[in-house]
Image (cartoon, helix red, strand yellow):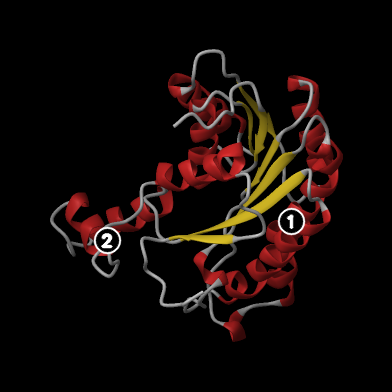
Amino acid sequence: MDLKLTGNAALVTASSSGLGKASAEALAREGANVVINGRDEDRLAEAADEIEAVAADGARVVPVPADLTSESGIRDLVRATVDEFGGMDHLVTSAGGPPSGPFLDTTDEDWYDAFDLLVMSVVRLARESADHLRADGGGTVVTITSRSVKEAIDSLVLSNSVRMSVVGLEKTLSKELAPEVRANAVLPGPHETSRIRELVEQSVERGEYGSYEEGLAARGESNPLKRIGDPIELGDTVAFLSSPRSGYVNGVAVPIDGGLGDSNL
């Protein structure tokens, strides 16, 4: 199915690896021009090369380093996207996860840092992008959060608490920026990102499993689909939500977890 994204301009944050990178890849494969973002310039350049290798003919991938906790960095990132492509049609927000730990071990600084990274980055990105997204027929915002929005996860008090603010913001944007801009969220469960690969490799080194494949399969046993997600599966969903093919989907938060969650809604 042609998602009708050819020639569109997208900014995907925290996209030098993981789910952000998969989202940028999915958009580029559909013909969108994409600015990818990260703090490590070498890693970012490597990711740009890898995405370009699978992008549709004519799609451009431009790496722009920026710190998502910096207000001026976000302003420059949005400006670079608009300058590079002549406008912006799609914003996909992603950010690294906050540290794990129980509530009583979490400091005030931890809370402020998590809020700055996960919430204020989206606030500033949406604010800086809104006029550009509204121009030329409108655009989309997709926020990548976590399944912890639906169900609290043990020892992830920061993610459980702070990420809910992102979904509240996304719902508000879906009304205040409409009808020109649609805003939706995706709530990923476990996917085979670098963090999961690292944990599986460590378990193999400890002798818990005979191979990486065995360890990865064991991690997926509790999922109804009996496997861990492939990041591109989430990326494809982000691309769909960014496309006119999902033109009547607005203000929703979609779990991408293989049915792992127990919540009815």
Residue drawn at x 75%, y 20% is 84
Residue, far left: 210
- 30 or 43: which is nearer to us? 30
Residue drawn at x 19%, y 50% is 213
Residue, far front: 248
Per the image, the residue denoted by label 2 is 225
Say which quarter of the image contains residue 31: top right
Dot 2 alpha-carbon crowd within 10 angstroms: few under 14, some 14 to 19, many 20 or more: few
Dot 1 alpha-carbon crowd within 10 angstroms: few under 14, some 14 to 19, many 20 or more: many
Residue 156 location in percent, x, y? Answer: 53, 74
Tag 2 secondary structure? loop
**Above or below 182: residue 2:** above
Residue 34 seen in render: yes
Query: Quadrant location of the N terminus?
Result: top left
Name which residue type carries label 1. Ser
Residue 243 seen in render: no
From the viewer's perspective, is the residue at label 2 or at label 1 nearer?
A: 1
**Above or below 236: residue 121:** below
Cα distance in 3D space between marks 2 and 1:
31 Å
**Residue 235 tag number:** none
Residue 243 location in percent, x, y? Answer: 59, 38
Tag 1 secondary structure? helix
Residue drawn at x 46%, y 25% is 50
Residue 134 location in percent, x, y? Answer: 82, 39
Kindly check if marks 2 and 1 are in contact, taking CB atoms under 8 A apart as contact.
no
* Left or right: where 47 falls relative to 130: left
- 86 or 219: which is nearer to us? 86
**Residue 174 tag number:** 1
Name which residue type carries label 2. Leu
